Image (cartoon, rainbow, N blue to C red):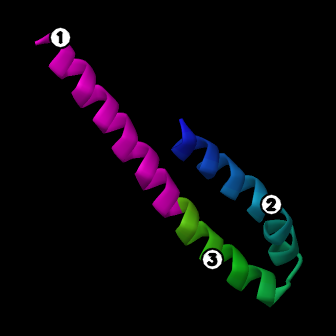
């Protein structure tokens, strides 16, 4: 599922900035907050895709 792959990619991209933010880098903290919003949106896309798959599966059984 491409939505899940996109979510995993976003998470791996933010790792370096999280470490920098923990070290006190304020700019990295700002980047992390922005990236976390993107991750939130990607997670929502995965949730919607799963619901669509479930709905399609249930229609096939009826």
Q: Residue at x 38, y 35 (%)?
A: 50
Labelled disc at residue 33: 3
Q: Mark 1 points at which residue?
A: 61
Local packing at callout 1 (Cα closer than 10 Å; few below 14, some 14-19, many 20+) is few
Q: In which quarter of the image is residue 34?
A: bottom right
Residue 14 image position (x, y, % from top left): 75, 64
Frontmost of labels 1 and 2 is: 1
Say which label, 1 or 2, has the lower sequence index: 2
Q: In this view, does 12 lie above or below 62?
A: below
Q: In this view, does 18 lie above or below 54?
A: below
Contact (Cβ within 8 Å) of mark 2 with mark 3:
no
Of helix, strand and loop, which mostly describes the magenta segment?
helix
Distance of mark 3 from mark 1, alpha carbons? 43 Å
Contact (Cβ within 8 Å) of mark 1 with mark 2:
no
Q: Does dot 2 land on a helix, a strand or a loop?
A: helix
Q: Which residue is drawn at 47% across and 62% down?
A: 41
- Quadrant for the C terminus in the image: top left
Q: Residue at x 71, y 80 (%)?
A: 31
Left or right of 19 on screen, residue 10: left
Q: Residue at x 89, y 76 (%)?
A: 23
Q: Name the residue under label 2.
A: 15
Residue 37 image position (x, y, % from top left): 54, 70
The magenta segment is 40-62
Say which label, 3 or 1, has the lower sequence index: 3
Frontmost of labels 3 and 1 is: 1
Q: Is residue 10 magenta?
A: no
- For the residue pair 36 and 58, the one nearer the viewer reads as 58
Contact (Cβ within 8 Å) of mark 3 with mark 1:
no
Distance of mark 1 from mark 2, alpha carbons? 42 Å
């Amino acid at each position: 599922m491409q939505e899940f792959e996109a979510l995993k990619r976003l998470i791996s991209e933010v790792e370096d900035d999280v470490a920098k933010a923990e070290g006190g880098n304020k700019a990295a903290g700002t980047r992390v907050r922005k990236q976390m919003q993107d991750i939130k949106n990607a997670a929502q896309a995965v949730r919607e895709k799963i619901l669509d798959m479930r709905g399609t599966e249930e229609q096939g059984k009826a």
